[in-house]
Amino acid sequence: MKKILYIGALLITTTYAFTQSKCDDHKDHEKKEEKLKEMRDKMAKELSLTDEQIKKINLIEDKYKIQEDELRNKSEELRKQIHKLKENKKSEIDKVFTEEQRQKIKKIKEDMHAKKNIYKKGLKYHY
């Protein structure tokens, strides 16, 4: 019985984690929350969870959700900071090059991008 409860709790929390991906739209978020609730209810019914067990699981999920949200927000902020650093680095390096060198770099990047697209399309052998 403990094994079943453990698996059920694991499934519920795993489902919860997968539904926490970034939502671009408020309706999207509502749909995910609704789907999560349906899955929780289904698991609770299949495992014959008591109201007490459901309350405990919900409290645990809420506690970790807050921590996950905080980390997710920090992570997003770090991504923005890293992006800004990369832009600054690129800008400073770009100032070191002559105009001719900038044009060569631009051409090299365009060629690399074109090759990348060729490989993505499956056209590996080109003459």
Image (cartoon, rainbow, N blue to C red):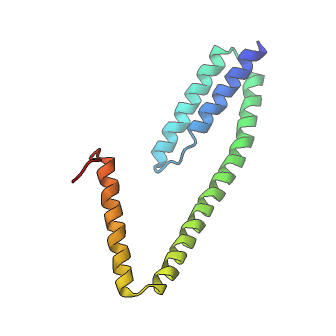
| Residue in the image at 68% along x and 47% along y | 68
- The quarter of the rendered structure image containing the N terminus is top right
Considering depth in this image, is 102 or 8 the residue closer to the camera? 102
Which corner quadrant of the image does residue 65 belong to? Answer: top right
User: Is 90 on the left or on the right of 1, as rendered?
Assistant: left
Considering depth in this image, is 3 or 117 the residue closer to the camera? 117
Residue 61 % position (x, y): 71, 36
| Residue in the image at 75% along x and 42% along y | 63
User: Is 105 on the left or on the right of 92, as rendered?
Assistant: left
Residue 84 % position (x, y): 55, 71
Considering depth in this image, is 68 or 26 the residue closer to the camera? 68
Residue 42 % position (x, y): 59, 20
User: Is 96 on the left or on the right of 120, as rendered?
Assistant: right
Q: Outermost residue, top direction?
A: 1
| Residue in the image at 57% along x and 72% along y | 85
Residue 8 % position (x, y): 68, 21
